Image (cartoon, rainbow, N blue to C red):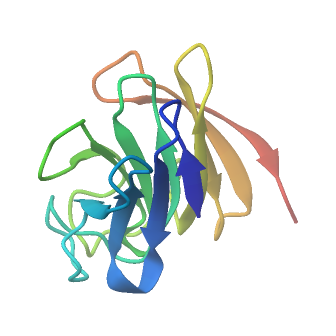
Amino acid sequence: MLFVDNSERVYVTDYTKHRVQRYSPVTGNFTTIAGNGTPGFLDNQLRFPFGIFVDKSDNLWVADTQNHRIMLWRSGASSGELVIGPKSPYLTADGDGLSFPFGLYIDYFGKLYVVDARNNRVQSWNLGHEPATFQCSIAAIS
């Protein structure tokens, strides 16, 4: 996946290298801004990231697909914060949990939408609370 921010920087998920990179049109360079290239569950690791979104504060949101979680990398941070998902790599999704989140989007009102691929649904989360609170499943695909 890729995302272009308001400064025309291009963000790319490097899926098989377990990282997200940012390309600067000013310097012509790529910089790793999330993940460390090694698959894993630590706060500085991703496991097959796919969907990404950059908010107006330049924070990077990542659908960490095979870790079944959504991670937030604040601008300039060297590790991410768990937003939604298991606190252990061995927990499984149930109820409003995620199973292979594939894409995400944050709307104008700060609501996070997640494509929850293995559960065949799109979920909505309120981000104004710590932690994010589940709102509803807004679509299901059979």
Q: Residue at x 31, y 69 (%)?
A: 91
Front in this rendered view, residue 54 or 135 = 54
| Residue 69 point in image, percent of width and height | 39, 57
Q: Quadrant of the C terminus?
A: bottom right
Front in this rendered view, residue 132 or 44 = 44
In terms of image quadrants, where is residue 89? bottom left
**In this picture, is 71 found above or below 101?**
above
| Residue 61 point in image, percent of width and height | 41, 45
In terms of image quadrants, where is residue 51? bottom right
Front in this rendered view, residue 127 or 12 = 12
| Residue 59 point in image, percent of width and height | 34, 35
Q: Quadrant of the N terminus?
A: bottom right
In terms of image quadrants, where is residue 29? bottom left
Front in this rendered view, residue 141 or 24 = 24
Judge whether residue 65 can be spotted in this image. no
Q: Residue at x 34, y 83 (%)?
A: 17
| Residue 110 point in image, percent of width and height | 52, 19
